[in-house]
Amino acid sequence: MSGTDGAARCGRDELMEVNAARALAGARNCFVGIGLPSTAANLARRTVNPDLVLVYESGTIGSRPTRLPLSIGDGELADTADAVVSVPEMFNYWLQGGRIDVGFLGAAQLDRFANINTTVVDRGPDRPEGRLPGAGGAPEIAANCGAVLIVLRHTRRNLVPALDFVTTVGHGAGPGDRAALGMRGAGPTAVITDLGVLRPDPDTAELVLSALHPGVTTEQAREATGWDLRVAPDLTVTQAPTDAELSALRALKAAGGRAS
Amino acid sequence: MADIRSLHDAVRDLVHDGDTVALEGFTHLIPFAAAHEIIRQGVTGLTLARMTPDVVHDQLIGAGAARKLVFSWGGNPGVGSLHRFRDAVENGWPHPLELDEHSHAGMANRYVAGASKLPFAVLRGYRGSGIPGRTDTVATVTCPFTGEQLAAVAALNPDVTVVHAQQADRHGNVQFWGLTGVQKEAVLAAGRVLVTVEEIVEGALEPRPGSVVLPGWVIDAVALVPGGAHPSYAAGYSVRDNDFYQRWDAVSRDRDTFLRWLDENVWNVRNVREGS
């Protein structure tokens, strides 16, 4: 089966979700945001990483949900966990304690250095700021996990030239900024979208297009990015989702509390 | 020892206009019934504290009870925006809503400092974030031992904390389990404490794995309110009503639809069980 055939069998969101799950191969544990990160992490446990320990900020460590939770507070997350801890313990001992390998975040706005805005958006001089949910756990997840993955849909509205507000630092203004701020982990190592995968350039920390999903063109990705997206010299095409990956993803969603 | 009281009387005596009120529950055991009683009694000018203000705070804000919100994430989990919260922040309806905004780690540590009766807590937090520029309750301190720059967050000591628990005994000792969130800290940080419970057991509380037990002498009032967390839930007693959370999006999107909902489900509902 060619990559294009594989892409034809599934939607763009599924390409994003399958590749986000693949990014968790080899990780011991993952601090999971709700929504797309939770879909990816639960799919990883059914495909590339059956032993992945899921950590939810509601206090559950080692959850094994049988269906996608609607919220991080769904009872099944606690019922199936190895341990349930209080929220202060989760943030102080487990996250700040440096015990989490990968933090998996979504974003409303993302800039070229993988900084995130989930606080407010500027809607022009005559209108009040548009209100977003706020930081949640993200600033400290991005600071303290060994590495950070980000998953979001690839649009000019989401991938912007300048954030309206910096909620969460990814790579700041470039190389060395994380170290200067005393942030311990490697920061964002991949941004998985419905068009491809962006990774920080090792020299500049700027996100560059490092892979396209089957059937997507470089021009489509550049057109959907709010900055002048550079393309990695070794640009690749992601492997088409396998039947096993697609059936696991669809089964997860069919049993889940979420529509997407 | 906590008094076992009706919800009506407990709210009347413990929650006053202008108070800072923490209604906590990290996605579980959210005290909806107590919030509705606060709305019914017409309490106003509240500063509401909650790590994750969700549908219950959308209701309190839309009903006009709040002047200010102290929080770290405001949304309808897994569904989308809180439309009443956004309408208050963006358009000042029904009142302008002042915000004191944090990260989860910061809010959790504000309660820890409050429970410890310390003026502040320290964490590695907010680094590079714009959040400290919008609040006066985050600052930087230097570690006296290593010289490391750390974030300091001001203690949060609510006038009143309201939580929902599975069980109390006749002496007002309270036990809750499952996702226990930040409730222990929020209770011990507060000046006054109201706990609504699913059940009052005869005799002693039976210890549950992973439970939090709060002795009755740190609680002012316990009110028996079975189902008092709905549409949230109480592990072992009920399950989360995910359909309600999804339906709330349409109810809350429009002011008139919301006000009709409030009339039918809060204002016109008497606390039948307590006969008040």
Image (cartoon, coloured by chain):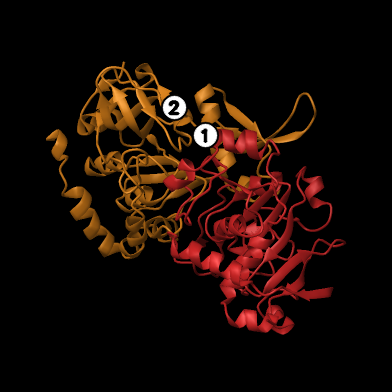
The residue that disc 1 covers is A86
Q: What's the mark number on residue B212?
A: 2
- Give the left or right position of residue B16, taking residue A218 as reference: left
Pick the front one: A76 or A228: A76
Residue A78 locus on image (x, y percent): 47, 41
CA–CA distance between discs 2 and 1? 10 Å
Q: Quadrant of the N terminus of chain A?
A: bottom right
- Give the left or right position of residue B269, taking residue B30 as reference: left
Please, is residue B244 above or below residue B220 in the view? Answer: below
| Residue B87, quarter of the rendered image | bottom left
Write the residue at 59% across / 40% down: B105
Helix or strand or loop: what does disc 1 sit on? loop
Residue A90 locus on image (x, y percent): 58, 37
Residue B30 in view: yes
- Give the left or right position of residue A33, taking residue B231 as reference: right
Please, is residue B29 above or below residue A194 in the view? Answer: above
Figure colour of chain A: red
- Callout 2 amino acid: Val
Is label 2 in contact with label 1 (beta carbons under 8 Å)? yes
Write the residue at 67% across / 75% down: A240
Figure colour of chain B: orange
Write the residue at 73% across / 47% down: A146
Pick the front one: B247 or A223: B247
- Give the left or right position of residue A131, taking residue A179 as reference: left
